[in-house]
Image (cartoon, rainbow, N blue to C red):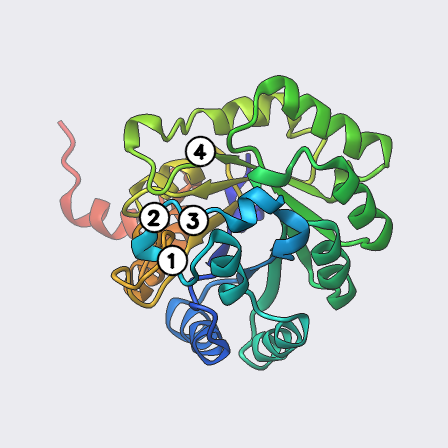
Amino acid sequence: MDYQKVQPYVIAEIGCNHKGDLNIAKEMIKVAAHYCKVDAVKFQKRNPKELLSSDEYNAPHPNPQHAYGSSYGEHREFLELTIEQHEELVHECKTNGIEYSSSVWDVTSAIEVADLNPKFIKIPSACNLDFDMLGVLLERYSGDVHLSFGMTTPEEEEQVIAFFNNLGRLDSLVIYSCVSGYPVSFEDLSLLDIQRLRDRYESKVKSIGFSGHHLGIAADIAALTLGAKYFERHFTLDRTWKGTDHAASLEPDGMRRLVRDIRNVNKALTYKREDLLDVEKVQRNKLKRKV
């Protein structure tokens, strides 16, 4: 791989870390754009009553201390921004010079976000086998689709690839190596799956990405050296905020360092341009000893 020709693309996943507050969401866009200097931010769009069964909707939140409602459905409703608010987020992203995107979790959300026509739409690991939703999305939307392979078997990966292939859309598909845990321990991170996905699919799909739910930023640099081009990390303004995703998220300084390090290491992943670089020639004349 010629790393200099494959520029890394960093996505700050805000998701629902805005706590259902549009003003917080807009502030997070500004921080991600100007302080962290990411390429894109990504939200989430759900229709809880469509996505959840009655039992799931009315069940208590599995982590009550993080609940924003008396049931899991009410919790999801509280965190959900309307499609009109997402339109405001699209405008906010344009104003601040970064791309808007969102993951979609059901047919209604897929239609709504597709009509916003972002550069790319994300399919979360939980929904990558919802072929009804994928079919509706691909019929309505011609942009890139980013899709995570967390909690997905190799056989199921093949089903997804075949589905996109049958619709002639592999050239707009970015697949992500991912382990679905919040946070994921380093021994479970399975970074070599990036190489496995490259070996099997790099010649077929648009690109390979890494969606990490781990602590720190060292693993993302390793993912870069293994050939990932797209990098997605959860983003928050405060990891102590109420909500299950904050603990596995990067705060602004962590995201800033991630972007800096990925871009700098990408520049360094080359062979020497010539036998002796200009910076070496100066030192050679001063220091080199010959016997």
Q: Position of residue 265 (x, y in %)?
A: 37, 47
Q: Nearer the viewer, residue 220 or 102?
A: 102
Q: Nearer the viewer, mark 3 or mark 2?
A: 3
Q: Secondary structure at mark 4?
A: loop
Residue type for callout 1 = Ala
Q: Are marks 1 and 3 in contact (CB under 8 Å)?
A: yes
Residue highlighted by disc 1: 67
Residue matched to label 3: 60
On the rendered structure, is 247 left or right of 144? left
First in sequence: mark 2 vs mark 4:
2
Please name the residue that numbered disc 4 is placed on: 179
Above or below: residue 49 compared with residue 287: below
Instruction: Say which of marks 3 and 4 sits in front.
Output: 3
**Residue placed at 39% from the left, 37% from the top?**
181
- Who's the residue at 45% across and 36% down the image? 180
- The tag earlier along the polypeptide, 1 or 4, is 1
Q: Secondary structure at mark 3?
A: loop
SS category of the residue bearing label 2? loop
Q: Position of residue 212 (x, y in %)?
A: 42, 42
**Which label is found at residue 63?**
2
Disc 3 to disc 2, C-alpha distance: 8 Å
CA–CA distance between discs 3 and 4?
25 Å
Looking at the rendered image, the disc whose residue lies closer to the viewer, 1 or 3, is 3
